[in-house]
Image (cartoon, rainbow, N blue to C red):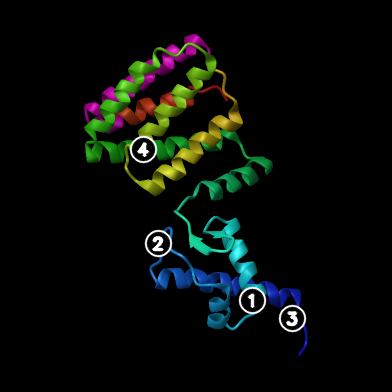
Amino acid sequence: MEPISTLERKSLKKMVIQEIKQYIIDHQLKAGDQLPTERKFTELFGVSRSVVREALSFLENTDVIRIRQGHGAFLNESNIENLLDNFFFLWQINSGKIQEILGLRILFESSAIDEIVKANRREDLNDLKKLVEESEQATTPDEFREADILFHKLLLQATNNGLFIQMTNMITSYFFQVQHIQITHEEYRIIVDEHRSIIEALLNGDADEAKGLLTKHIKNIRV
């Protein structure tokens, strides 16, 4: 038998990756469930154990599964943050512009406002209002920055949509990470007032007003 070429091996690995994913779907495995052994997958797919091991290693590196030595492979909780982190890293080194992330933030956070008003999440909005009041006690640039980030993250969490929250939290976090925004005390006072106005509009059920205030608020950020 002729040795398997590199190209054939890559194709086999790709095929086994897809087969394992399909197995997970077909058997309705959930986070924490254990996958079959390497030997079992070898028998199921008719490939060598080394190809199965490579496929499992790829799935572990992409956070689909976790492998515990001596125990086997287990399905992970859904988490899109690592995928988005790699995406934004490649975007950044390929001349990505910070204004593009600003546009994404406006798009996603405006969608969040529509969802929050539609669902009338009064408890979440009252928690946000309380956060804004407490944030007035911030006194240092680091505290200003953290309070602003937390406001936007809690606003997004008020949608109660897990996938949406993961995606938008990553966008917000990445923006502040790459921008290294420094906020003065005077600027922070304006930010707090803007946060307060957004919450009041949401409590009044005025999505258009809240989105207008949010858009202006985000665009006011120095980039």
The range drawn in magenta is 184-208
For mark 3, give the secondary structure.
loop
At label 1, which amino acid type do we have?
A: Arg
* Mark 4 vs mark 3, CA separation in Å: 50 Å
Residue 49's label in the rendered image is: 1
* Mark 4 vs mark 1, CA separation in Å: 43 Å
The residue depicted at 23 percent of the width and 40 percent of the height is 119
Between disc 1 and disc 3, the foreground one is: 1
At label 2, which amino acid type do we have?
A: Lys
Instruction: Tell me where residue 49 sits by quadrant.
Output: bottom right
Whole-percent x and y of residue 209?
Answer: 30, 27
Which residue bears the numbered disc 3? Answer: 4
* Mark 1 vs mark 3, CA separation in Å: 14 Å
Instruction: Give the mark nearer the N terminus: 3 vs 2.
Output: 3
Between disc 4 and disc 1, the foreground one is: 1
Magenta-colored stretch includes residue 222:
no
Instruction: Give the mark nearer the N terminus: 1 vs 3.
Output: 3
Location of the C terminus (image quadrant)? top right
At label 4, which amino acid type do we have?
A: Gln
Where 24 sits versus 106, above or below? below
Where 72 sits versus 62, above or below? below
Where 115 sits versus 25, above or below? above
Which residue bears the numbered disc 2? Answer: 30
Where 38 sits versus 31, above or below? below
Q: Residue most toward the front? A: 70
Q: Is residue 183 visible?
A: no
Side (left or right) of 111 relative to 166: left
